[in-house]
Amino acid sequence: MFHGAITALITPFRDGQLDEDALRKIVRWQIDQGIDGLVPVGTTGESPTLSEHEHKRVIEITVEETNKAVPVLAGAGSNNPVEAVNYSEFAYQAGADATLHVAGYYNRPNQAGLYEHFKYVHDNSKLPIVLYNIPPRAVVGLEVNTLARLAELPRIIGVKDATGDLTRPIRERALVNKPFSFLSGDDVTTVAYNVGGGNGCISVSSNVAPKQVVTLQRLCREGKFTEAAQLQDKLFNLHCALFLEPNPAGPKYAMSLLGFCSEECRLPIVPLQDSSKATIRQAMIELELITQ
Protein backbone atom coordinates (compact mmCIF):
# COMPACT_ATOMS: atom_id res chain seq x y z
CA MET A 1 0.00 0.00 0.00
CA PHE A 2 2.74 2.48 0.92
CA HIS A 3 5.56 3.44 -1.42
CA GLY A 4 7.38 6.45 -2.79
CA ALA A 5 7.49 9.86 -1.13
CA ILE A 6 5.37 10.02 2.02
CA THR A 7 5.45 13.27 3.98
CA ALA A 8 5.83 13.29 7.75
CA LEU A 9 3.63 16.35 8.11
CA ILE A 10 4.39 19.27 10.40
CA THR A 11 1.57 20.41 12.69
CA PRO A 12 1.16 24.19 12.21
CA PHE A 13 0.46 26.39 15.23
CA ARG A 14 -0.57 29.99 15.64
CA ASP A 15 -0.50 31.68 19.04
CA GLY A 16 -0.19 28.34 20.78
CA GLN A 17 -3.17 26.77 19.05
CA LEU A 18 -3.54 24.29 16.21
CA ASP A 19 -3.77 26.27 12.96
CA GLU A 20 -6.44 24.25 11.17
CA ASP A 21 -6.59 26.47 8.10
CA ALA A 22 -2.84 26.20 7.57
CA LEU A 23 -2.96 22.41 7.96
CA ARG A 24 -5.69 22.13 5.34
CA LYS A 25 -3.70 24.34 2.96
CA ILE A 26 -0.55 22.25 3.48
CA VAL A 27 -2.36 18.96 2.85
CA ARG A 28 -3.93 20.26 -0.37
CA TRP A 29 -0.55 21.55 -1.59
CA GLN A 30 1.13 18.25 -0.85
CA ILE A 31 -1.44 16.41 -2.95
CA ASP A 32 -1.15 18.96 -5.76
CA GLN A 33 2.62 18.40 -5.75
CA GLY A 34 2.12 14.68 -6.37
CA ILE A 35 2.96 13.23 -2.95
CA ASP A 36 2.43 9.47 -2.53
CA GLY A 37 1.13 9.51 1.04
CA LEU A 38 0.84 11.54 4.23
CA VAL A 39 1.75 10.88 7.88
CA PRO A 40 -0.04 13.17 10.34
CA VAL A 41 1.03 13.33 14.01
CA GLY A 42 4.37 11.62 13.76
CA THR A 43 7.49 12.98 15.43
CA THR A 44 7.71 15.81 12.89
CA GLY A 45 4.08 16.58 13.75
CA GLU A 46 5.12 17.21 17.39
CA SER A 47 2.93 14.39 18.64
CA PRO A 48 4.57 14.37 22.10
CA THR A 49 3.23 17.86 22.88
CA LEU A 50 -0.21 17.61 21.28
CA SER A 51 -3.24 17.10 23.49
CA GLU A 52 -5.39 14.07 22.78
CA HIS A 53 -7.99 16.35 21.19
CA GLU A 54 -5.37 18.01 18.97
CA HIS A 55 -3.86 14.65 17.98
CA LYS A 56 -7.23 13.37 16.85
CA ARG A 57 -8.17 16.64 15.16
CA VAL A 58 -4.99 16.62 13.05
CA ILE A 59 -5.80 13.11 11.83
CA GLU A 60 -9.39 14.10 11.13
CA ILE A 61 -8.42 17.18 9.10
CA THR A 62 -5.76 15.32 7.13
CA VAL A 63 -8.21 12.58 6.17
CA GLU A 64 -10.89 15.11 5.24
CA GLU A 65 -8.62 17.20 3.03
CA THR A 66 -6.95 14.17 1.45
CA ASN A 67 -10.34 12.68 0.58
CA LYS A 68 -8.73 9.37 -0.47
CA ALA A 69 -6.48 11.06 -3.06
CA VAL A 70 -3.48 9.44 -1.35
CA PRO A 71 -3.21 7.05 1.61
CA VAL A 72 -3.02 8.47 5.13
CA LEU A 73 -0.73 6.70 7.59
CA ALA A 74 -1.84 8.12 10.92
CA GLY A 75 0.59 8.32 13.81
CA ALA A 76 -0.93 6.33 16.67
CA GLY A 77 2.09 5.15 18.59
CA SER A 78 2.61 5.22 22.33
CA ASN A 79 4.72 3.44 24.91
CA ASN A 80 1.36 2.60 26.50
CA PRO A 81 -0.32 -0.03 24.29
CA VAL A 82 -3.77 0.89 25.62
CA GLU A 83 -3.29 4.48 24.46
CA ALA A 84 -1.95 3.21 21.13
CA VAL A 85 -5.13 1.19 20.66
CA ASN A 86 -7.24 4.25 21.50
CA TYR A 87 -5.50 6.35 18.86
CA SER A 88 -5.74 3.46 16.39
CA GLU A 89 -9.47 3.16 16.91
CA PHE A 90 -9.91 6.88 16.30
CA ALA A 91 -7.81 6.70 13.14
CA TYR A 92 -10.03 3.89 11.90
CA GLN A 93 -13.20 5.86 12.63
CA ALA A 94 -11.76 8.96 10.97
CA GLY A 95 -11.03 7.06 7.76
CA ALA A 96 -7.24 6.73 7.83
CA ASP A 97 -5.74 3.93 5.75
CA ALA A 98 -3.21 2.61 8.27
CA THR A 99 -1.44 3.51 11.50
CA LEU A 100 2.21 4.08 12.37
CA HIS A 101 3.40 2.65 15.70
CA VAL A 102 6.70 3.40 17.39
CA ALA A 103 8.65 1.01 19.58
CA GLY A 104 8.22 1.34 23.36
CA TYR A 105 10.25 4.39 24.30
CA TYR A 106 11.25 5.14 27.91
CA ASN A 107 9.96 1.88 29.42
CA ARG A 108 12.69 0.08 27.42
CA PRO A 109 11.15 -3.36 26.77
CA ASN A 110 13.25 -6.28 25.55
CA GLN A 111 12.52 -8.01 22.23
CA ALA A 112 9.82 -10.19 23.79
CA GLY A 113 8.19 -7.10 25.25
CA LEU A 114 8.35 -5.25 21.94
CA TYR A 115 6.72 -8.19 20.19
CA GLU A 116 3.93 -8.39 22.76
CA HIS A 117 3.38 -4.61 22.63
CA PHE A 118 2.87 -4.62 18.87
CA LYS A 119 0.87 -7.85 18.96
CA TYR A 120 -1.48 -6.34 21.53
CA VAL A 121 -2.02 -3.27 19.35
CA HIS A 122 -2.50 -5.51 16.29
CA ASP A 123 -4.99 -7.78 18.02
CA ASN A 124 -7.04 -4.90 19.41
CA SER A 125 -7.22 -2.60 16.39
CA LYS A 126 -8.53 -2.79 12.84
CA LEU A 127 -6.22 -0.89 10.49
CA PRO A 128 -3.01 -2.08 8.85
CA ILE A 129 0.08 -1.24 10.90
CA VAL A 130 3.49 0.10 9.89
CA LEU A 131 6.16 -0.41 12.56
CA TYR A 132 8.42 2.54 13.36
CA ASN A 133 11.93 1.40 14.25
CA ILE A 134 13.92 4.36 15.58
CA PRO A 135 16.43 3.43 18.29
CA PRO A 136 17.96 6.95 18.49
CA ARG A 137 14.66 8.25 19.89
CA ALA A 138 13.10 5.15 21.46
CA VAL A 139 16.36 3.78 22.98
CA VAL A 140 15.20 0.27 22.04
CA GLY A 141 14.90 -1.09 18.51
CA LEU A 142 13.36 -4.03 16.72
CA GLU A 143 15.89 -6.68 15.81
CA VAL A 144 15.60 -8.25 12.36
CA ASN A 145 14.19 -11.53 13.68
CA THR A 146 11.61 -9.72 15.82
CA LEU A 147 10.45 -7.66 12.87
CA ALA A 148 10.16 -10.79 10.73
CA ARG A 149 8.11 -12.48 13.45
CA LEU A 150 5.81 -9.45 13.70
CA ALA A 151 5.41 -9.46 9.91
CA GLU A 152 3.70 -12.83 10.26
CA LEU A 153 0.75 -11.01 11.83
CA PRO A 154 -1.70 -10.30 9.00
CA ARG A 155 -2.18 -6.55 9.42
CA ILE A 156 1.45 -5.61 10.02
CA ILE A 157 2.32 -4.44 6.53
CA GLY A 158 5.50 -2.42 6.70
CA VAL A 159 8.31 -0.73 8.58
CA LYS A 160 9.68 2.79 8.78
CA ASP A 161 13.38 2.23 9.32
CA ALA A 162 15.38 4.94 11.06
CA THR A 163 18.11 2.67 12.39
CA GLY A 164 20.78 3.99 10.04
CA ASP A 165 21.70 0.40 9.15
CA LEU A 166 21.53 0.11 5.36
CA THR A 167 21.74 -3.70 5.53
CA ARG A 168 18.33 -3.83 7.19
CA PRO A 169 16.12 -4.00 4.08
CA ILE A 170 18.35 -6.74 2.64
CA ARG A 171 18.26 -8.85 5.80
CA GLU A 172 14.57 -8.25 6.48
CA ARG A 173 13.45 -9.06 2.95
CA ALA A 174 15.18 -12.42 3.29
CA LEU A 175 12.86 -13.28 6.20
CA VAL A 176 9.57 -11.50 5.38
CA ASN A 177 7.51 -13.73 3.12
CA LYS A 178 4.65 -11.45 2.07
CA PRO A 179 4.12 -8.08 0.37
CA PHE A 180 5.63 -5.54 2.74
CA SER A 181 6.44 -1.82 2.67
CA PHE A 182 10.10 -1.14 3.47
CA LEU A 183 10.25 2.61 4.08
CA SER A 184 13.30 4.66 4.97
CA GLY A 185 12.99 7.17 7.78
CA ASP A 186 15.99 9.18 6.64
CA ASP A 187 16.04 11.49 3.62
CA VAL A 188 19.83 11.54 3.33
CA THR A 189 20.21 7.76 2.89
CA THR A 190 16.96 6.92 1.14
CA VAL A 191 18.53 6.13 -2.24
CA ALA A 192 20.94 3.65 -0.68
CA TYR A 193 18.07 2.16 1.34
CA ASN A 194 16.04 1.71 -1.84
CA VAL A 195 18.99 0.05 -3.57
CA GLY A 196 18.88 -2.51 -0.76
CA GLY A 197 15.23 -3.24 -1.45
CA GLY A 198 13.33 -0.36 0.08
CA ASN A 199 10.36 1.12 -1.72
CA GLY A 200 10.03 4.61 -0.31
CA CYS A 201 10.70 7.16 2.40
CA ILE A 202 8.67 8.80 5.12
CA SER A 203 10.27 12.15 4.48
CA VAL A 204 10.78 15.39 6.39
CA SER A 205 12.22 17.26 3.43
CA SER A 206 9.09 16.62 1.38
CA ASN A 207 7.28 19.09 3.62
CA VAL A 208 9.40 21.73 1.88
CA ALA A 209 10.30 20.21 -1.50
CA PRO A 210 7.61 17.61 -2.22
CA LYS A 211 7.92 17.65 -6.00
CA GLN A 212 11.66 16.99 -5.89
CA VAL A 213 11.35 14.19 -3.33
CA VAL A 214 8.54 12.59 -5.35
CA THR A 215 10.77 12.67 -8.42
CA LEU A 216 13.64 11.08 -6.52
CA GLN A 217 11.45 8.22 -5.33
CA ARG A 218 10.02 7.72 -8.81
CA LEU A 219 13.52 7.41 -10.24
CA CYS A 220 14.28 4.75 -7.65
CA ARG A 221 11.14 2.79 -8.53
CA GLU A 222 12.19 2.92 -12.19
CA GLY A 223 15.63 1.57 -11.30
CA LYS A 224 17.32 4.83 -12.31
CA PHE A 225 19.52 4.93 -9.23
CA THR A 226 22.29 7.00 -10.80
CA GLU A 227 19.82 9.76 -11.65
CA ALA A 228 18.24 9.44 -8.21
CA ALA A 229 21.65 9.82 -6.58
CA GLN A 230 22.32 12.95 -8.66
CA LEU A 231 19.05 14.47 -7.46
CA GLN A 232 19.85 13.42 -3.91
CA ASP A 233 23.12 15.36 -4.20
CA LYS A 234 21.12 18.46 -5.14
CA LEU A 235 18.80 17.94 -2.15
CA PHE A 236 21.61 17.17 0.28
CA ASN A 237 22.09 20.72 1.55
CA LEU A 238 18.38 21.03 2.27
CA HIS A 239 18.28 17.67 4.09
CA CYS A 240 21.15 18.74 6.30
CA ALA A 241 19.94 22.29 6.87
CA LEU A 242 16.54 21.16 8.11
CA PHE A 243 18.22 19.16 10.88
CA LEU A 244 20.78 21.69 12.08
CA GLU A 245 18.60 22.02 15.17
CA PRO A 246 15.97 19.68 16.64
CA ASN A 247 13.15 18.74 14.26
CA PRO A 248 10.67 20.26 13.38
CA ALA A 249 12.05 23.75 13.99
CA GLY A 250 13.86 23.60 10.63
CA PRO A 251 11.01 22.46 8.39
CA LYS A 252 8.58 24.82 10.13
CA TYR A 253 10.84 27.78 9.42
CA ALA A 254 11.17 26.63 5.81
CA MET A 255 7.40 26.32 5.50
CA SER A 256 7.02 29.83 6.88
CA LEU A 257 9.27 31.06 4.06
CA LEU A 258 6.91 29.35 1.61
CA GLY A 259 3.99 31.20 3.19
CA PHE A 260 2.13 28.19 4.58
CA CYS A 261 2.31 28.72 8.32
CA SER A 262 4.19 30.32 11.19
CA GLU A 263 7.51 28.87 12.34
CA GLU A 264 6.02 28.33 15.81
CA CYS A 265 6.89 25.11 17.64
CA ARG A 266 6.03 23.93 21.12
CA LEU A 267 8.53 23.63 23.94
CA PRO A 268 10.94 21.99 24.41
CA ILE A 269 11.58 22.79 20.71
CA VAL A 270 12.86 26.37 20.60
CA PRO A 271 13.20 28.91 17.76
CA LEU A 272 16.10 28.53 15.37
CA GLN A 273 19.29 30.54 15.64
CA ASP A 274 19.77 33.12 12.91
CA SER A 275 22.68 31.13 11.46
CA SER A 276 20.46 28.08 10.97
CA LYS A 277 17.77 30.21 9.35
CA ALA A 278 20.31 31.62 6.91
CA THR A 279 21.50 28.13 5.97
CA ILE A 280 17.96 26.88 5.37
CA ARG A 281 17.11 29.94 3.32
CA GLN A 282 20.22 29.47 1.16
CA ALA A 283 19.45 25.79 0.58
CA MET A 284 15.94 26.72 -0.55
CA ILE A 285 17.28 29.40 -2.90
CA GLU A 286 19.67 26.87 -4.45
CA LEU A 287 16.72 24.58 -5.17
CA GLU A 288 14.67 27.52 -6.52
CA LEU A 289 12.01 26.95 -3.88
CA ILE A 290 12.21 30.65 -3.02
CA THR A 291 13.85 33.56 -4.83
CA GLN A 292 15.52 35.36 -1.92
Image (cartoon, rainbow, N blue to C red):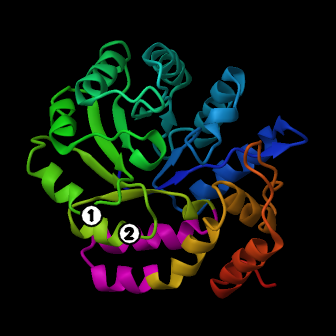
Q: Image height check: is 32 above or below 128?
A: below
Q: CA distance from mark 1 to mark 2?
A: 8 Å
Q: Mostly what secondary structure, the magenta segment?
A: helix
Q: Position of residue 289 (x, y in %)?
A: 69, 77
**136 on left or right of 255:** left
Q: Position of residue 143 (x, y in %)?
A: 22, 42
Type of amino acid under label 1: Leu
Residue 225: within the magenta? yes
Residue at 60% over, 69% down: 209
Residue at 71% over, 57% down: 249
Residue at 23% over, 44% down: 180
In the image, the segment drawn in magenta is 208-232
Picture quadrant where residue 283 is located: bottom right
Dot 1 or dot 2, earlier in sequence:
1
Residue 182: within the magenta? no
Q: Nearer the viewer, residue 11 or 240?
A: 240
Residue bearing the label numbered 1: 166
Categorize mark 2 by other alpha carbons within 10 Å: few (<14), some (14-19), many (20+): some
Residue bearing the label numbered 2: 189
| Secondary element type, mark 1 | loop
Quadrant showing the N terminus: top left
Residue at 80% over, 62% down: 256
